[in-house]
Amino acid sequence: MRAKRTPPQFIPCRGRGCAPPGPRESPRIRRHACSCGEPRFLSWRMSWGRPGNGLGVGIKFGICLHHRHRRLGARRSWSRPRVPPGRLRAPPAFDRRPVMALVRRFVTTLVALLIPAAPALAQDLYDTTVLRTFHIQFRDANWLTLLRQNYSSETPILADLTVDGVTYPSVGVRIRGNTSYTALPSGSEKFSLKIYVDHVDPNQELMGYDTINLNNAFRDPTFCREVAYNNYVARFMPNPRANHALVTLNGQNWGVYCNIQQPDKRMLRDFFTNADGLRIRCPNNPNGPGLRYNGALPSGYTGYEIQEPGGLADPWGALIAVCNVLTNEPLATWPNMDTLFAIDPSIWSVVLENLLTDDDSYINKGADFMTYRDPLDGRTHLLQRDANETFTQSAWSITRNFTSTSKPVLSRMLAVAELRQRYMAHYRTARTDVNWAYFGPIFTAHRNLIDAAVQADPKKLYSYALFQANFTSTVNMPYTGIAGGNIVGLQQFVDQRVAFLNGNAELVANGPTIVSVTPSTATPIPGNQVVISANVTPAGSAVSRVELFYRPGPAGVFQRVLMSGAGPTYTATIPLTGTPGQRVAYYVAATAANAYASLTFSPRLAERGPQFIEYGVSGQPGMRITEWMYAGINGEFVEFTNMSAVPIDMTGWSMDDDHATPGAFDLSAFGVVQPGESVIVTENTASVFRAGWGIPPQVKILGQLGSASGNGLGRNDQVHLFNHLGQPVDRIYYGDQTYPGTVRTLNASAQTCSDHLGLNALDQWRLSVSGDEFGSYTAFGDTGTPGFYFMRSCCPADWNADGVVDFNDLLAFLNDYNAGDPRADVNRDGVVDFNDFLAFLNDYNTPC
């Protein structure tokens, strides 16, 4: 196939439009409107195709030659799918032109014949819009008897699990729960189940999870309380996510279940930089230990279970130290509590338990909770673990059990006036969406999703009529004991709870309004200080003080500085000079001059969701993170690109996830990386990843990220790049849950233009879309350009990247163009030719 090019010709303009196509022009090409209105217009047309084969393409370019309007236009017309010509150079497989689409289609087809088929998309196991079926096939004929016999010992029995057409062999299954099993009505077989996907194969997972909890919605005719509660709590603090599922046991329909995420290390990774710390469970107990001090010996703490020792030589000693400081620390020196027990983050847990009335909770029983000790700072966080009895008690006092000495988090810690007002401030934030306008659509969506399945559920505890009625009305559950009695309707509860809370004077006494909080710069140069400004106005009462809270590192106690000003503007300087890559968290607190000293925070989540400033890692271009995807059919990956003008030897270099530890994953095998060259790290094997994406052999790939070191990527995670000295070179902090509104790289990578590289500016990254300016394409349901970074600048015409588009950029481009530099291939067709010159002129005349 040859490229046939018609010579340039001048076509006079007619008014504001150009002449109709000439005799050698394709009738499919519409005329180009010449906005200059001048009688001079350069027309250029190229066409490809074989005579008579029915395949062809034409491109007509036009340039207005008026001295004030150097405007480039281009029109493309397509007859049928084209096959344009052109020699291919590396990187050939990622050209956006249709010929490469055909090449990719061929490669994809070939690969599909060589490797096993994969599911269409990596999926979210807790997507609330999806009702999956868990098909469990037990190996033993007497499986039902074995399940019941093994309840007390918690011994799983073998089964095969099939979900979405994929079978996971040799999983372990057991009955789970406390009263949800022991108090079941006589003859009921609607027991809750726990599935260990990795029971035999330690590497086996279901959509990234190795433990599944299927709960029976005990005491909930709607099946929705536990799901809605968990997802609401997860908006504010580390907590399991949830949705609904269908279950079959050996081919029999077992009906609808609540699918609740396991509160384990996998969950913690979405919220903590390091999820390997001490994790303790306090099981259900009507008179729970409540973190009160009970002596210096572990024998006094039998109500707790250590699930993960966190590498501590004495994990019991760590728990006892927390109980001691909560119970015995003088309230005048309460900040000492914060060094061992994360006060502000833990307040959220008791706020949410109270707000939506969690019966199985710390605030009610002093039990059914868990704690996590962050190894980065040694502080323990109070978390939740059981939510099957919620949305029921609309008249709970907001200070429920604040005088209970068995619960020192309530009776002692929140006895401190300032901390009590933190509790009230967080309560006001959490209750913002507690109304039927918010919860009504959520419960309606859940009901619509499971309605038919509930009606067909032969094992359900409560009738379909009760299911329908309990969304709005109180119903009577027709059993004796715990399984029976009245339960308030969901809409009734929400409306009554709102009315009850509105009657509490302390709660409705608002703190000042924090209109805005801004840093003098969010990306300071190392060695410089940053000034934080807050615009604060009264909200019913005068502003008594405004304070800045900041944390110099990724964990630890926040320090405070009084902000100066007479209002509405208050300022304070963060009293530190940053080091390269240092990330400083901060938030602002404003106190009202009312009877309660009511507080307001900005951001409203305070320590759970602060703002950040981040000191640059280097003022010079170098190796940069240019693309990443945390989950995909072809595996997660990170791409690094040498953005400098000199080769970089990566011997001794390393990367890590949110542990941020130099040397964690060795990158020495990349060797010398040339200017403009991209390299890839993936969790998959290098060969499978290369085949899946169709990546040429010259692209360097290192596989099996996380297989040994455990530093694979999560949904909310970090990527850190270190040089041979262990110094930070680049990093990106990401996560659509941690940073709402930012990208979620599930089946699509994130990329950004070169101006934003190295800044950790997550809001400037966007998801790859097939055919975008990065040259993205789709392979087996994943979209990106692993191995090739195409963008030069956020302003394409700023060729010399000096921040200004001027004649120097044109000269710089012409130098690259005349040298045949691959960077001058503006249109990404694999050839540096006159079409690239025209494409650059189009960019040059388009304002950035």
Image (cartoon, rainbow, N blue to C red):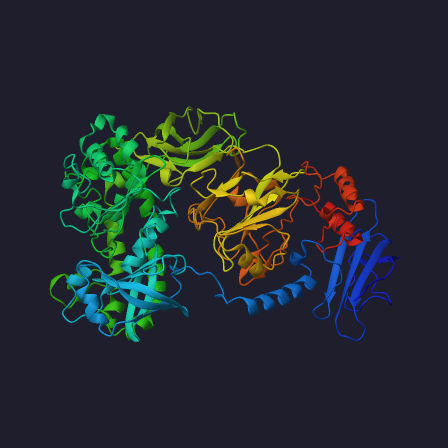
Left or right of 115 on screen, residue 697: right
Of the 4 image quadrants, the one containing the C terminus is top right
Q: Quadrant of residue 540?
A: top left
Q: Residue furthest left?
A: 480
Left or right of 799 on screen, residue 297: left
Instruction: Look at the image and tell me whether residue 795 can be seen.
Output: yes
- The location of residue 827, given as percent across then percent down, is 71, 53
- The location of residue 333, given as percent across then percent down, is 24, 26
Instruction: Look at the image and tell me whether residue 215 can be seen.
Output: no
Q: Please name whichever residue, 109 or 596, is drawn nearer the observer in this view of the structure.
A: 109
Q: Please name whichever residue, 458 or 588, is drawn nearer the observer in this view of the structure.
A: 458
Q: Quadrant of residue 243?
A: bottom left
Of the 4 image quadrants, the one containing the N terminus is bottom right
Residue 246 drawn above or below residue 760: below
Residue 679 drawn above or below residue 587: below
Left or right of 157 on screen, residue 579: right
Q: How many marks?
A: 0
Q: Residue at x 16, y 45 (%)?
A: 302
Left or right of 380 on screen, residue 732: right
Residue 655 drawn above or below residue 244: above
- The location of residue 637, given as percent across then percent down, is 52, 51
Q: Quadrant of residue 593?
A: top left
Q: Residue at x 18, y 51 (%)?
A: 284
- The location of residue 490, given as percent across then percent down, is 26, 59
Q: Please name whichever residue, 714 or 562, is drawn nearer the observer in this view of the structure.
A: 714
Q: Please name whichever residue, 753 or 264, is drawn nearer the observer in this view of the structure.
A: 264
